[in-house]
Amino acid sequence: MPHQISVMVHTPAHSGIGGALTYESDAAHTPGTLVRVPLGSRELLGVVWDEAEPPLPSGDHASIANTNTNEQPSLLMPDDPSLQNHAPVAMQLRAIASVLEGLTPLSAHWRQLVQFAAHYYQRSAGEVALAALPSQLRDLSTEQWARRLKRKPKAVVAYKGATQTIPTPTDEQAQVLADFATNKGPFLLFGNTGSGKTEVYLRAAQAELERDPQAQILVMVPEINLTPQLEERFRARFCPQWGADCLVSMHSSLTPAQRLKHWLAAHSGEARIVLGTRMAVFASMPHLQLIVVDEEHDPSYKQQEGARYSARDLAIYRGQLEGAKVILGSATPSLESWHHSRPATDTEPAGRYMRLAMPSRVGQGALPLVRRVDMNRQPYKTVFSNHLLDAMRERVTRGEQILVLLNRRGYAPVLNCNDCGWKSECPHCSAYRVFHKLDRTLRCHHCGFTQPVPRACPTCGNLDISPLGRGTEQLEEHLAELLADVRRPDGEPIRIARIDADSTRLKGELERQLAEVHAGAVDVLVGTQMIAKGHDFRRVTLVAALNTDGALFSSDFRAPERLFSLLMQAAGRAGRDANMSLVSPCEMWVQSHHPLHPLFEALKQHDYPAFAEQQLKEREQATLPPFSFQALVRAEARSQEAAQGFLNAARDAGAALADELLVDLYPAVPMTIQRVANIERAQMLIECTSRKALQHFLAHWQADLHAMRSAHRQVIRWAVDVDPLAI
């Protein structure tokens, strides 16, 4: 007897098909089973979802798989023309094409996580579910999958790396681990840079693995460049005991075949530890017992395309679902996490998280002394103050390393003609093309449009066109000139290296450059925020931060939080080796035109709690997150008028419900960079003091947004971003 089954497939975002589709099958299939099903003229991978609802006489357009090539749901109407205007009385379901044998069904907890993420972030469950699966699994036909199953598994390879010496935990680490063992969490591990947070992760993971022979651990990091060094530490600790295959990684640098192999290892339970970036939060791990989110404050945990989910927040939800403990770790926690971990007071209860503190560095390592340079007292266009240059020369001659942070890549942000005022604007974006001197190009960092540098001004023909501002390329060149007379202790010339997105584009280049820094082959490292996160540079004793003032007065209320976090993280790269600190105290130099700003005052004291208290007080007064909840609706069209027209029409359509739920709808405005690749972009902010009311509004408003597409044909796409990080 044929069975009706519900299957979740990756349907187009604006197709109007948001739920599971109903198919026919000769046998019943357990929810979570992977199947291949026809949709229009294609055959797609799908996930068997919950039991299918009995079909309604009028047809459920969101759950019927059709036979039309345009993928619009349709019902088969009776042949009698007199019945054409009545409700359909018969419905033909398409049969599933095949079942992927040899795979255990995806767990109910995994499906619930997907369902929650889709509902909360206003996307279809099929889109979230299928995007979470490896691309090769989606693309393999049934025959290809069968051939893959027949391959003989490779013999288990013994771990050949060096066994790690397990250090004795500090008193603070021991106290944190004791609190972790006796409480449920979630936990916010507030540990200073160099306090040994990674050792806490390792010991917590080891305790879970020893307690349960099937336990699995998920460890997430924000950036791919942090994965190799953390993976090396985890392998050295766990592979000698649990085998070389006990740990797999998940990030976008893997090939499709590698990602499928690692996903299958986690899904089968063979991999005990999964180490990855934000995508790993959806890894299928049937025996998950511990989730670690390292550097939880990092914006990289927020997806910016498709389903705009926060991996950090989903990790908290997944921990509740699976009964797994969750550790959020950071030296500069996000203000949301800090607020949620607040201790109880006379006026308000404690937050939902338990805060664990490790304020001291391991060993004798000391936090750097922060020196502020008032650039108002320096000559015009000074890049490095004389005092900073003297300090850099002294460090290099002693064989110590220096980190120079400038969060802007390229040689200069813009080329300029002094005669007519021409600037290197991108013809396709409302932004400037950046001057890259190494390959003599003007490159747009938004759309990728690249042209050779013109020999003369394109407008007036002036041969004297000059760069405005500076990037890491220019800084590297300028430092080589300023420190040309400095020699290393062995008499060799100074060695300067640069690490940014341009210098590490080639595969393996980042690992090679970092290895040179760790080996002491580099004296001065110039870079963007890539060099400020998580790296354990043992010989760095001086960090210099340039051009830090832009975020102090930004229109984005999160800009000071990001700046303070970046500077604190950069400062944490210095003084990690106690032996180096004993020779000369480590330093961080900050050049600013506003050196007395409260942010720099807190930085000088390494006082994150004081900074967080001041910022949270301002946000509470302005009713900004975490004291309110926000969503952004972004629209893209060929003209700014069309994009804003769609958003303002949507605002009018939802006004009545918004008033009822006390949701604030702001007028549509252009985005900061309003044109990218000849597409105009606009946004509208939605705000409410109740998360539940905001979610209720968004869920009911979706129907209005879909219905308006027919009246606004010029709109190319629109998307809802819940809990946005940039406005």
Image (cartoon, rainbow, N blue to C red):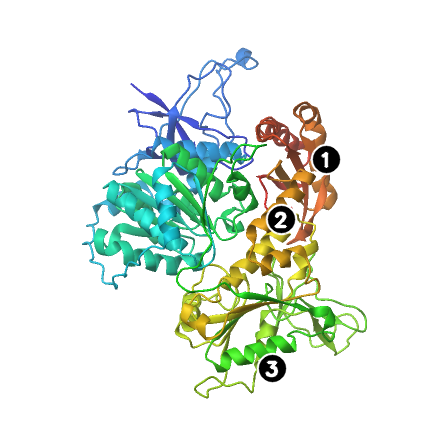
| Residue 401 vs residue 640, the one in the foreground | 401
| Crowd band around label 2 with a 10 angstrom C-alpha radius: few (<14), some (14–19), many (20+) | some
Pick out the residue farthest to the front. Answer: 346
Give residue 697's position: percent from left, percent from top: 61, 28
**Residue occupying image coordinates x 73% and y 69%:** 376
Q: Secondary structure at mark 1?
A: helix
Pick out the residue farthest to the right. Answer: 420
Foreground mark, 3 or 1, reads 3
Contact between marks 3 and 1 (CB within 8 A): the answer is: no
Give residue 534's position: percent from left, percent from top: 45, 59
Question: Which circle's residue, 2 or 3, is located before the other in the chain?
Answer: 3
Dividing the picture into quadrants, the one containing residue 391 is: bottom right
**Residue occupying image coordinates x 25% and y 41%:** 211
Foreground mark, 1 or 2, reads 2
What's the distance in space between the residues labelled 1 and 2, CA to CA? 26 Å
Q: Provide the residue designation for mark 3.
A: 482
Q: Secondary structure at mark 2?
A: loop
Give residue 299's position: percent from left, percent from top: 54, 50
Q: Provide the residue designation for mark 2.
A: 558
Q: Provide the residue designation for mark 1.
A: 648
Dividing the picture into quadrants, the one containing residue 198 is: bottom left
Look at the image and tell me whether residue 257 can be seen: no
| Residue 201 vs residue 607, the one in the foreground | 607
**Is residue 144 shown left or right of residue 620?**
left
Question: Which circle's residue, 3 or 1, is located before the other in the chain?
Answer: 3
**Residue occupying image coordinates x 79% and y 68%:** 421
Question: Which circle's residue, 1 or 2, is located before the other in the chain?
Answer: 2
